[in-house]
Image: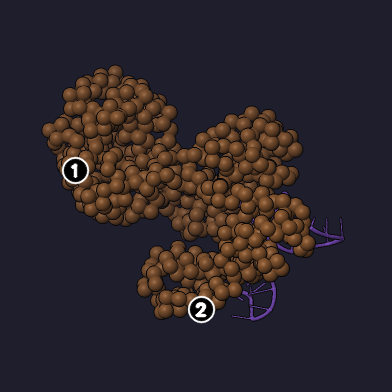
Amino acid sequence: MNKKMVIKTLEKIALLLELQGENPFKVSAFRKAANALELDERSLNEIEDITALKGIGKGTATVIHELIETGQSTQLKELEEVVPKGLIPLLKLPGLGGKKLAKLYSELGIDSAESLRAACVAQQIRQLAGFGPKSEEKILKELDQLGERSERLPIWYLQQIVNEINEVLRSITEIQKFSVAGSFRRVSEMSKDIDFIVATEKPEQVKDQLLKQLTIKEVVAAGDTKVSVVLDAEDVVNVDFRLVTMKEYATALHHFTGSKDHNVRMRQLAKEQGKKISEYGVEQPDGTIMTFDTEEDFFAHFGLPFIPPMVRESGKELERVDELEGLVSLEHIVSDLHMHTTWSDGAHTVKEMGQALIERGYTHGVITDHSQYLKVANGLTPERLKKQRLEIYDFNEANPDFRLFAGTEMDILPNATLDFDDDVLKELDFVIASIHSSFSQPQEKIMERLFTAIQNPYVHMIAHPTGRIIGQREGYNPDVPQLIQWAAEYGKILELNASPYRLDLCIEHLMMAMEYNVPIAINTDAHAIEQLDVMEIGAKYAQKAWLKKELVVNTWSLEQFETFIRKNK
DNA sequence: GCCGTTTTCGGCCCGACTGTTTTCAGTCG
């Protein structure tokens, strides 16, 4: 029995205990134990004393040991015997938790969506204490929607929704300040809802305006401090607005940015200092509530530097604050090494893209249009590539304080050869190799293709190494750890593609690349000027992976970059 | 169920909202 399965079993036990209406702390103890295992980097064999892990005690250790030895859990078996399977999906219904479901089961024998619906229709539920006619109505409505709503939505979709909401919030004059919070602010790949913190002296008016201006499918809650709605968009999405005063803004923003584990850790720390954190401020030992102008001040109050939202995850970031200063951030970025122009499938000319890079304060950049194989994208032949280079030279002459390099995003072909000969490649300043075709080949073949590119002396970088689109397609499933080892061995750059559709490599692989000291380039892959701005998302995502500045190629000076790209020539 | 150098018992993050209640339980984040 491997660690993943042990974790799953512990979570399953928690779920079933919840459905028994068990003490919530007992339930969360099992979840915490699962979490402790997950956070520990060692395998089960490597952990000598499992109870030494915080959150694992006698009870959960017994379960874990039994699982390791027999592959089964007596406790799980017993629970499965008494808790009907059909109750598990019902936990997803908003408004129904373990206690209520336990009651519905014990009092009315409800053990499935069908029997729940029947009991609602027969008006049996309103007879139970704690339930009423509205409960029946709500359950019926939620039952109809069960399975319709997607659990989590990808960052690229939510970004559009956030932009639209930002517009609405900007238009409401009673709002003094606002910000998105929650996992979206932490730059999670997927989020299940969007949170906003809104500072205002007139919550009533703001509430009315929000309900009026947003395209709402359903109002979930509308109180004095919280407005929760389901937006009517292509994919429906839950949005919560927290209405607070300016004084409370910083602590509220911190609180609702989370993560949950980060907040738990912060609260523990506060407690050690005799203080108490809530979304409205920090209660001091003498009972007074202290508020802060900024999140920086809030952290400083606890003797901590500002912890960026992106790294507020497990709570362990509180022990790693020394490393924060060395992390890459948008201010360090001086170049963008992957973009397209009208020569292939981009919307703007070489000159326009170059100018846009200058306006972003960069010192250099690379034009990397598609290669000839990609006909749908008007990929460049060697002849057109040569012509394009002249345009790039012209641009450099006109802009002596900036440097535009001539590059390509060359396809790695399905037969594991490259789209350009070495003669063509050696004329270029910077060569990106990437896969845009035959995603479904066996992993072996995909790796053969990648290896061809890796060992070519003129290739500098592999772009979007897995080809994934977040929440939509898996990509071509390369053996990334192997690719990382090759990159280290052959001195190649791997890309963090900053497009919110891709964010490729992912966090886990970025961390692995860092262990091998593989240089990472955060690139926008822009097909239009506006898309150069996704660099911000890329830089934030890199922070989430704790990526160090030195390892990020776009932070290198023009001289450093030139030295690197010339070394094989 | 887990945890502890003020604790081996009594907390466990804590507050808002809803729907059920006449003061609160359950759910949620």
Chain letter matching colour brown: A
Q: Amino acid at mark 1?
A: Asn
The image shows residue A343, relative to residue A486, as above or below, that is: above
Q: Quadrant of residue A114?
A: bottom right
The x and y percentages for residue B15 are 71, 54
Q: Residue at x 66, y 39 (%)?
A: A199
The residue lying toward the viewer, choosing from A251 and A283, is A251
**Dots 2 and 1: beta carbons under 8 Å?**
no
The label on residue A452 is: none
The reply to the same-chain question for discs 2 and 1 is: yes
The residue shown at (46%, 67%) is A7
In the rendered structure, the colour chosen for chain B is purple
Which quadrant of the structure image shows residue A536? top left
**In this view, A172 is above or below A310:** above
In this view of the protein, which residue sits in the foreground, A434 or A541?
A: A434
In the rendering, at what x and y percent does residue A6 appear?
45, 70
Q: Name the chain letter of the residue that bears numbered label 1.
A: A
| Residue at 42% from the left image edge and 40% from the top image edge | A501
Element type at mark 2: helix
On screen, A249 above or below A116?
above
| Residue that badge 2 annotates | A74
Task: Using residue A286 as the reference point, say whether residue A560 is left or right of it.
Answer: left
| Residue on which disc 1 sits | A415
Nearer the observer, A148 or A329: A148
What scheme was used to colour the molecule? by chain
Mark nearer the N terminus (2 vs 1): 2
